[in-house]
Amino acid sequence: MNKRHLDFNIWLKDKLKDPEFKAEYDRQEPEFAVIRAVLRARMDKGITQKQLAEKVGTKQSAIARLESGKANPSIGFLQKVAEALGTTLQINFTKPA
């Protein structure tokens, strides 16, 4: 049986044509950006969620929730994560394009 593989980027490009979907996607983009940044920094550093959690002073499950988008972290928590990753937390307000 042949399974058809759907590339996520192709699927997303198609879904973003729907104005209602695009509005919700745009609304959640800042959250996605935080998740991507934490994942990228942790992987660049070559550490596990558990190792990051130990550096932050929290449990691995808290890092897993952050990376899965199931958490609503405080700025203070994100600051601790950034410090544990050897990075700085930067928040910007910009005008829409």
Image (tube, helix red, strand yellow):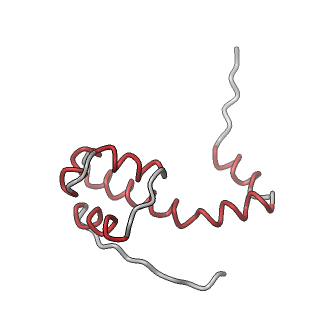
Task: Name the residue rendered at 70%, 48% in the picture.
Answer: 10
Residue 81 in the figure: left or right of residue 36: left
Up-down: is 50 above or below 87? above
Task: Name the residue rendered at 69%, 61% in the picture.
Answer: 24
Q: Position of residue 18 (x, y in %)?
A: 81, 57
Q: Quadrant of residue 86?
A: bottom left
Q: Position of residue 49 (x, y in %)?
A: 29, 46
Q: Hey, which residue is sitting farthest right in the picture? A: 18
Quadrant in which the N terminus is drawn: top right
Q: Hey, which residue is sitting farthest top in the picture? A: 1
> Looking at the image, how many numbered discs can be counted on the residues?
0
Work out whether residue 5 or residue 85 is closer to the camera in this orientation and state it. 85
Q: Position of residue 53 (x, y in %)?
A: 24, 50
Q: Quadrant of residue 85?
A: bottom left
Q: Quadrant of residue 76?
A: bottom left
Task: Name the residue rendered at 26%, 47% in the picture.
Answer: 59
Q: Position of residue 45 (x, y in %)?
A: 26, 54
Residue 27 in the figure: left or right of residue 47: right
Residue 8 in the figure: left or right of residue 94: right
Task: Name the residue rendered at 48%, 50% in the picture.
Answer: 70
Quadrant in which the C terminus is drawn: bottom right
